[in-house]
Amino acid sequence: MKRASLDRILVIALFSVCLVWLILPLALAVMWSMVDPDYVWSYPDLFPKVLSFKRWGLLWETTTLKQSMANSYLLAISAAFTTLLLSLPTSYALGRMHFRGKAVVQTLILLPMVIPGFVTAIFFSSLLFSLGIYSKFLGILIGHSVLLLPYALRILSVSFAQVRQDLIDAARDMGASRFTVFRVVFFPAIKPGILASLIIVFIYSIEEFALSFIIGSPEFTTVPTILYSYLGYQFIRPNAAVVSLILVVPNIFLMLVLERVLKVANPATIVGKG
Amino acid sequence: MKEKSDPWLVALLLLPGCGLIVLLVGAVVVMAVVQSVGYFNFAGESGFTLSHWKDQMSSHRLWRSFGYSLKIATLSSVLSVLAAYPLALWFRKPFKGSAFISSLLKAPLLVHGLVAAFLYVNFISFNGFLNQLLMFIGLIHDPIRMQNDERGIGVIILQLWKQMPFALLLLTGAVQAIGDDILLAAQDLGAPAFARFRKVIAPLTLKSLQAALVIIFIGAAGDYSFQVIAGPVNVNSITQYMYIIQNESGGWNQAAVVAIMLMAFSLVGSLALAAIAQAVVKRGQA
């Protein structure tokens, strides 16, 4: 059999697997989110009798979803900008300076990624408790801002490293001040990196579960913690479907924007998304 | 990249990024260590004691959790890599439809873990689509209970769903980086496909293979949400056990012991897996 024919057969076979593995579960989630509350979807109906957006409206009006979304998005915006401000000086040092122990620093910044999330969450909450910090929002914001620093540092240090030295030298030779050099040489070059860093920290902050759950529960809810409440002890399937889509769809859209910003085939190659 | 660096300036610039990370992660680890030996006892008297360690070391439930998490983490990382390798080799050379199918396979990377758990549970639950379909086509008469299976197969399927794309991402990059000349040379020397894999591809992609194994193992060893939603109810993962004793029994100090053991387990387990992978590849090369 020719290679092209074999490839075609394998593509069809793999697409069939993906259909059951990925597309069907997602389609079921969409259908469950649109099951009309007045018409139960159960055996022998393979598909719902009536589809509507009533469940979305009900959830919006009668649960803490509105507040959870406000909490999540406010946290994510705050964490994205805090992380950006914290990461700029260190990224500059990592991207443009030679110093002893650079490799050690590059390894140390990965620490939050190797400590299990629940260990960090439980003992960070213990630390906040010992320090007398009782604000749930502030506690989670500190946690998100520091724990998501590795992503911002990784993106921005690459951006700083890519700024052309001849442009910096030319600007300096023409008498530009430090601020002007930053404005006309550095800023245009690192702008995509800044945007990418804001987007990736925003997405990770929205998705972060362990810290938000341990520090925030039960009073301070975010989108993942409210989703967990529908999946845990009481499995409320239509509600879980609605919240799942609220969590997934905007983030997929943002990842596509990120992909364009980074101009790479898959943003996961840079940010290790997953 | 070409600036002379004043050590004080470098230190000052590193403080807000690296300094804060080391401070926070260091504080978390120190907090866990000191709580494990009796300090910061929020529910009683604080002071040095090894009783929490003694209690946990003799806990049957803890060792059961370790055995279970070891099984889940090892199987998840090994199966993810085994599933990803042939796909990565297949995608080495682009062909019609390869970009589409590769994107589809990597799509779970963009799906939140809790959403993945929901999709799975929704599919296989007692009143889920799979049971309805099986009954509809007459294969079964009554729904089968597949959720929270005793062996943790559901958790492994979820880990595979979420982590295989990550292994695929790492391995595809590594496999594509191997030059055609090397593989053609091996082919010209008469090496069959499996020998080319053993002697050329596996050694050249070892670093990515180890990275995938380590990252997936650490993630699976510290899993909480997949276990709580889809895992067995008669055994806990280590993280779940740690959370239960901290949250339900207020045992911060006991939880600290489990946390330290979990960190050590993640580190030792992932490094051991990486070492085994290296040994296997070297043996295959010989």
Image (spheres, rainbow, N blue to C red):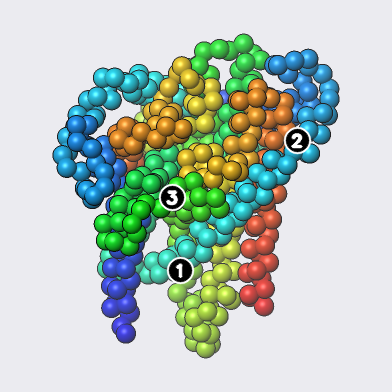
N-terminal of the two: label 2 or label 3? 2
Residue B282, relative to residue A66: is it above or below? below
* Contact? badges 2 and 1 (CB < 8 Å): no
Nearest to the eye among marks 2 and 1: give it. 2
Residue A221 or residue B100, whichever sits in front: A221
Residue B69 placed where, x, y %? 62, 47
Report the disc number at residue B145.
3
Residue B225 placed where, x, y %? 50, 38
**Extreme front residue here?**
B141
Identified by mark 3, the residue type is Arg
Residue that numbered label 2 is attached to? B56
Residue at x-position 61% and y-position 31%? B244
Residue B214 or residue A247, whichever sits in front: A247
Residue at x-position 58% and y-position 12%? A133
Residue that numbered label 1 is attached to? B86
Residue at mark 2 shares a chain with residue at mark 3:
yes
Residue A83, relative to residue B81: is it above or below? above
Residue at x-position 45% and y-position 58%? B168
Identified by mark 2, the residue type is Gln
CA separation in Å, label 2 and label 1: 43 Å
Mark 1 crowd level (few <14, some 14–19, many ≥20, 10 Å Cα): some
Using the image, name the chain to which the residue with label 2 belongs: B
Using the image, name the chain to which the residue with label 1 belongs: B
Residue A76 or residue A109, whichever sits in front: A76
Left or right of B208 on screen, residue B274: right
Identified by mark 1, the residue type is Pro
